[in-house]
Image (spheres, coloured by chain):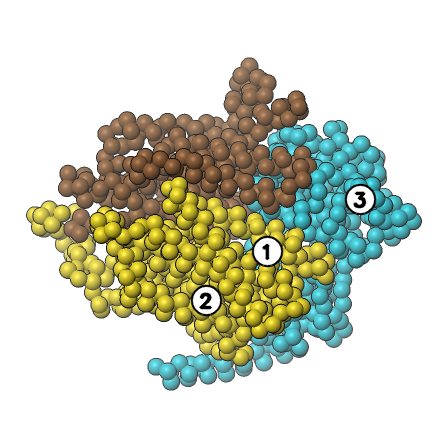
Chain colours: A brown, B cyan, C yellow
Amino acid sequence: MSAELALLGPILAAMLAAATPLLFAALGELVVEKSGVLNLGVEGMMLVGAVCGFAVTVKTGSSTAGFAMGAAAGAAMAGLFAVLTLLLLANQVATGLALTLFGVGLSALIGQGFVGIPIPDVPELYIPGLTDIPVIGKALFGQDALVYLALAMVPAVHWFMYGTRKGLVLRAVGENHAAAHALGYKVIRIRFLAVLFGGAMSGMAGAYLSLDYTPMWAEGITAGRGWIALALVVFATWKPARVLLGAWLFGGVTIAQLHVQGLGIDIPSQVLSMLPYLATVLVLVLISRDIARIRLNAPASLGKVFHPDA
Amino acid sequence: MGKTLMGLAAGAAVLALGAGAAVAQEKMKVGFVYVGPISDHGYSYQHDQGRLAVEKELGDKVTTTFVENVPEGADAERVIEQLASSGHKLIFTTSFGFMNPTLKVAQRHPDVKFEHATGYKRAANVATYSARFYEGRTILGLIAGKMTKSNVIGYIGSFPIPEVVSGINAFTLALREVNPKAEVRVVWVNSWYDPGKEAEAAKALIDQGADVISLHTDSPAAIQVAQERGLWAFGQSSDMTRFGPKAHLTAIVDDWNTYYVDRVKAAMDGTWKAVDTWGGFKDKMLFLAPYNPAIPQDVVALAEKARTDIMEGKRHSFQGPVKDQSGKVVIPEGKSATDEQILKMDWYVEGVQGKVPK
Amino acid sequence: MSLLRLEPRGQASRVMVYLTPVIAVALTLVSGFLLFWAMGFDPVKALHAFFIAPLMSVRGLGELAVKATPLVLCAVGLAIGFRANVWNIGAEGQLTLGAITGGGLALAFYGDGGWWLLPLMIVAGMAGGALWAAIPAFLRTRFNASEILTSLMLTYVALLLLNYMTHGPYRDPEGFAFPESRLFEADAVMPILIQGTRVHLGSLFALLAVAGGWVLIARTFIGFQIKVIGLTPAAAGYAGFNEKKIIWLTLLLSGALAGLAGLGEVAGPIGQITPTVSPGYGFTAIIVAFLGRLHPVGILLAGFLMALSFIGGEAAQIGLGLPKAITGVFQGMLLFFLLATDVLIRYRVRFGAQKKAAGKVMA
């Protein structure tokens, strides 16, 4: 039994790392959706962020520069989305999906010269004493800096949304853009900024994958994590803390099922691989039963086109 | 409108025919169909290296065409058909899922020659080819048995197909030949290429005590993890040393260059036949990447001896007696596994933990 | 503030409905020309390969129909749901289930089939897809769980289930343990409609779905309810429309059509069950649905355009060595232009500054 118990620390550590890209992307999308915009292009923005971040790190040798570039590239993709949906009033669902298609192609194109190139690993944190604590020390105090940044974004986003005036305005715009406009708020500008933020966060999620989690560039390196992040926003009923819960749940079950396989337990690997998805659905069902709460949280104007004169 | 279109169509057809005839006289068109992107630096990349070798070797006598990222569904047949009907005289379809589409197209184009990788169905104009990857796994198993301290080896599998299962078995047999106490733990990631998932699988195996990681997936993610943790790993499909110079023990490198050049030459001089080629070290279809300098000399010598023995036919990866997990002798003493047994392998040998997913 | 601004039209422009796709294609051609030229390819040849070459033969046109069939089948069903604000984004999973259930019958009755087998498979395929969509419907109506999440997550589960089936129960016993089923027998395969092509019965079903979808939306009371719920949910509540019924109906319908699409693939061009049935048709169909403005006839056209861009990309790869990555970028551009020019239907582009007062009053 102690052998299984000793696995708890490593599982915890791996779970925190696995949840990091999901956290970045989902928190970004949460802000976007709270402003009333639905951007389904997360996967595409992550990919472009991943490849641009990687390219800059290869050229400059600095993973900090790479990470910043990843955020900028994600924001640039989001800017394209914002121009199309907010200024040209294109359908958000279709434009987001087209953005993903575009991002898959664009990232592959940019990445052609960067396949098979190794980059230096981002060093992990080491705090003497704390990191050495048995079982949980390495998990809690021995991760990459970005893992902590993603965690810090949870209270930061929550504070912005519920503790600042700007956050209040953003939520108002997402609830009822016509009323917000009538009150004199610049709906399009606010949404534009929210979309850019979401893009930057997606770009960081991608850059975390290509610079830190598996330091390499490969076509489609995100492997569907953008879609999971989108699902997590719904899972979280647009609440930052619940995004964290969802990311840990999904990441944790993913890691745990790999451990179960390694222990040689006789369940088909495909069935075990289904568990993270099934667990997410199950927990969603459990927390969704309170109808009134969810209605209150879903931005009422989500996905709806806004034009000041309409 | 209709008439204009028809006129255009006729014009284009005449042009296409004229161009096709002119080219056919001088250059032979050779087509390649890949399941992944050529930039995967693994499976499809190695096939594309073979295509480049053909271009280099035969220069202006050939033109080559490739189509990458072809899904193994209804699209494959159309891509192969397009190659066949646009003047390509020899077409390599490089993934198992292209088997039936290749045969369907081949039936309609008896004058075109086809080569399907890793399949088992042939026709008058369809040859098959594959490499005996399991031979390489034997060498890796020997090295792993000597390098492991924890006697736990982690093995990352893609999908439980015979090629992967026979690789696990060949590896385990060699492992336990030099280290009877060692065992193999397998984790399936249900993907050929998902760096994140492969890294997670490597971490899980290492956390369970593995100190050597072997993989049958295409990305170098697991090698990076091993490097970070100061442990060992083997590469797959291509030399992955640069992703973890300290951890990378060696790698099985697929090599299609010689085979592709030979087959194109055969098609040109009329000696091409629809045969099955299943080549190993001897046929230069696989190589080992340079050994890590950290491997002791006697272990390198052991590995090299085994490799030479395999090439000379003195050693077989599945030399009896081979027992399955229940202890039943499947391959009796004095015999080695038949090709059919290896091709159909869906059981584990003794020393592998868990069951083959079915 | 800006020199250009959009002014709402009182009524959607009939002219622009037909003109915008032309404008979008023209913009795509111009920017495609520049893109290919910048990447060092002959732009005329590349554009010809993309848009003209696939249309130049009966076989090419047939392939277009084969590729458009699953897209249209899925998109028609999805569009009906989207109109009612039911966000089924798991058509890919429902398609996969259709292949598993319908295709499974072909294997179960291997060797003793008959004329009845294919019709039975079609029913089973639709039932499989509908069953998979029934889970999100149940979870939404009973537990209030968002169908966006559940239908997406169930897609991954379905793909893994297909993987499990092809490695296990469905595996060809003579297939050297490779993960593929046997090839279906003749009475389990969709008949070919046009000789010399791969156009199969599924394409006819797609046309029927377009016609049926149009009738449902435009001519029935259910269609009316769907529209009302989608546009003004509150009004639908006052009118006493049963929202749960509409959720069930639209999900079951879109699931059944996606299941039919999946069966059409395994019993059509593939002819067996393989671990990869669809290269993402269920997801692409979402774009097709919106590109077709959620209208069945629009979806038919959008499905063909989308299919053309895929097949054209292949043709350009074969003919000119144009990398697949450029195809993706080009496809994205095409979609952006199509989506962006839509604005001209409801808005006029005006130059010069806005009259402030008028804008305020209207808001």
Up the image or down, B249 lies above or below C285; here it is above
Q: Residue under circle 3?
A: B324
Q: Label 1, secondary structure: give it.
A: loop
Q: Would residue A59 be found to the left or right of residue C188 on screen?
A: left
**x 17%, y 62%: residue:** C11
For residue C69, the mark is 2
Q: Amino acid at mark 3?
A: Asp
Q: Label 3, secondary structure: give it.
A: loop
**x 43%, y 68%: residue:** C206
Residue A254 seen from this side: yes
Q: Would residue C86 be found to the left or right of residue A276 on screen?
A: left
Q: Nearer the viewer, residue C261 or B333?
A: C261
Q: Residue under circle 1?
A: C275
**x 51%, y 30%: residue:** A16
For residue B288, the mark is none
Chain under callout 2: C
Q: Would residue B120 be found to the left or right of residue B8 on screen?
A: right
Chain under callout 3: B
Separation (CA) of disc 2 from disc 1: 20 Å
Q: Amino acid at mark 1?
A: Pro
**Image quadrant in which you'd find residue B180:** top right
